[in-house]
Image (cartoon, coloured by chain):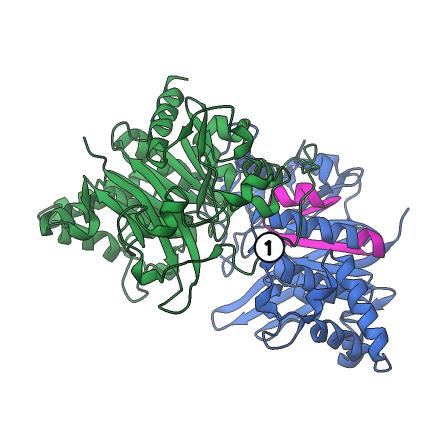
Amino acid sequence: MATDVLRVEDLRVWYHTPRGPVKAVDGVSFGLLSNERLGLVGESGSGKSTIALALMRLIRPPGRIEGGRVQLDGVNLLEIADEPMRRLRLAAIALVAQGAMNSLNPVVRVREQIIDGMRDHDEKLTKQAAAARVASLLDQVGLKPEVADRFPHELSGGMKQRVCIAIAIALRPKVILADEPTSALDVVVQRQVMETLKRVQEQLGASVVLVGHDMGLMAQFVHRLGVMYAGRLVEVSPVGEIFVEPLHPYTRLLIGSLPSLEEKGKFQGIPGLPPSVLERPSGCSFHPRCPHAMPRCSVEDPQLQQVRPNRWVACHLYDESESNGKVVVSP
Amino acid sequence: MSSLLEARGVSKIFGGGLFDKRVTVALDAFSFAIESTPPRVTAIVGESGSGKTTLARLLLGLITPTTGEVLYNGTNLRKLARDDRRSFLRDVQMIFQDPYEVYNPFYKVDHVLETPITEFKLASGQQARRALIHESLRAVGLRPDETLGRYPHQLSGGQRQRIMVARAVLLRPRLIIADEPVSMVDASLRATILDSLRQLNRDYGMSIVYITHDLTTAYQISDNIIVLYRGSVAEAGDVDLVVRQPKHPYTQLLIQSVPEPDPAHPWGAVEIRTDVGEVANGATQVELNVPVGLLPAGAGASATAKAHGGHLLSGCPFADRCPHVMAMCRDSVPPLYQLDPARAAACFLYRDSGPALAVEQLNEVMSAAGSSARST
């Protein structure tokens, strides 16, 4: 069995608001295999972006990591001090944030922005070595070396996003987190950027967690998909199986709500409304919208359990296949 | 008979001045007529910088064209008499992209529904007003008791957007222009909003112009489609023809790039040319030989425009990225070639495959598209 590069256990992140805590991430566990591309998909407010920030330990007040473990290379990221964590960011775990392209400094040339991160981790870097690194990084993300001399406003959105990928891979991290890396880009450019990310990930032998809402993009990019709903993972399955036979009713409805170019008139919305983050429904959060809801669904919170090889689901419909009462492992 | 709303040879240029001749052509010699009978759903699809939002704002009269004119019942929007202007404001309704920005947070959502009733005297008496509001909310699948009396922040983005659709229903417009109405709404609620637009077309006979970057939703709800690329029509016609058998190289690239929610259908293996042609802003920049202020407002009357058959561009805007580019593509703007009764594509690859159309003749293609969609 392949080993996990990254292991997240019972991660809980709350935002403390005057109206009470918002449990944005409420007990999420998963593992990331080496060379794996894992997707976390969910609607707004499902907690997917919070997970990405928590893994980088970039949660700001009023948000707080309430508990859990994030195991990377034998180190629990949630336990170490700030300085060692700062050294691990970019070097071991890097984030391409949502709208990262707009976080580039508008008055600094691309070259300096790429070198900046490297220098921060390796002060001995010579000028020539840095220039060579920049050129090879730009080449890796499919940009010409001239781009190094440009300012961000001289680049298109897709080019800027590729510069951000170059910065993220500058120190060859083991784990790349990508939070909606293409949400502001057109489909043609989106495909170029995602193909670049895929190629770079394979070359580096890194693993990727792709966070997003676009099921189409997930289908094209990831190996395994985790579906988030109201701060929990409700299903984790290999992407080839989840689209053919989704197990959780929410996954099934979500896939049914996707318009396709293949068939006309076959998409339908999910009835009801996404849950309020402050007042989560009792029991299973999805039960008010679920067509298969049973009496126990409004009382008992279903746990994520493996119901078939590699297929995990948190739903009472699959309780009979539960072999042992207590689930100790996670996907 | 004149069309309900018609863009005739419309171009829109941003930037430029007396001395600065570098301008951005947001829309180049665009002609398209929207009829109210039969009511159709027309999708206008393009990426950012393609001119789709500029087109929406031109059609609404929010901005004036640099050349060409927009006509409402045959009269230029800028020359409408007072009464005609009022009926225009009622006949043509807009649904904007951001359902968070259109509300005043200090008013209950009832306000956006009551204002048009007062403004256009749609009902007299409290009872009639309520009845009208309830009916329009139900038409878009909202329960009045769960919606009215609340403040915008108490409703989800999907609910707010549906209230905007309800507001449009209230006025019984003949045309709704919806600019990216679902791009800020969660996937699970998109289908519901698109469905209510489709219902307005079917049940109330409203024409709809659906402006989007999302080819899949456009395919799902429209009869006709216009694919814009950097201010020009790349391909247009019956949505099934254009999406199922795209002819223009850009449309083909666009369709192959859509991430299908099906791992068994991976992205097409077409080689995308990167870097070249990718500019900071998606729109096309050109250098004019006259200052913008001296461009005559009449359709295609400028010297630059005359030289290129009504166009401000000097070649095919897709030439830089096109895998099939030929020398002629850079020298002149390809006209629309009619490839089927209900489809035309602006590409020299098809110069022997069908008659070249004048820009105004796109309307005939679009009419053919609507009728064939109806008969199937």
Spot the blue chain and give its letter.
Answer: A
Q: Position of residue B308 (x, y in %)?
A: 41, 44
In-front residue for pair B131/A145: A145
Q: Quadrant of residue A73?
A: bottom right
In screen coordinates, is A46 left or right of B92?
Answer: right
- Say whether residue B111 is visible: yes
Spot the green chain and give its letter.
Answer: B
Q: Position of residue B140 (x, y in %)?
A: 33, 40
In-front residue for pair B231/B329: B329
The residue pinned by badge 1 equals: B278
Residue visible at 38% across and 57% down? B13
Q: Position of residue A138 (x, y in %)?
A: 75, 62
Residue range highlighted in magenta: A201-228
Q: Is residue B278 magenta?
A: no
User: Which chain contains the residue that carries disc 1?
Assistant: B
Q: Position of residue B114 (x, y in %)?
A: 20, 53
In screen coordinates, is A290 left or right of A242?
Answer: left
- Say whether residue A31 is visible: no
Q: The disc labelled 1 sits on which kind of residue?
A: Glu
Q: Residue furthest top?
A: B375
- Local packing at callout 1 (Cα closer than 10 Å; few below 14, some 14-19, many 20+) is some
Q: Is residue A210 magenta?
A: yes
Q: Residue furthest right?
A: A1
Residue visible at 28% across and 55% down? B64
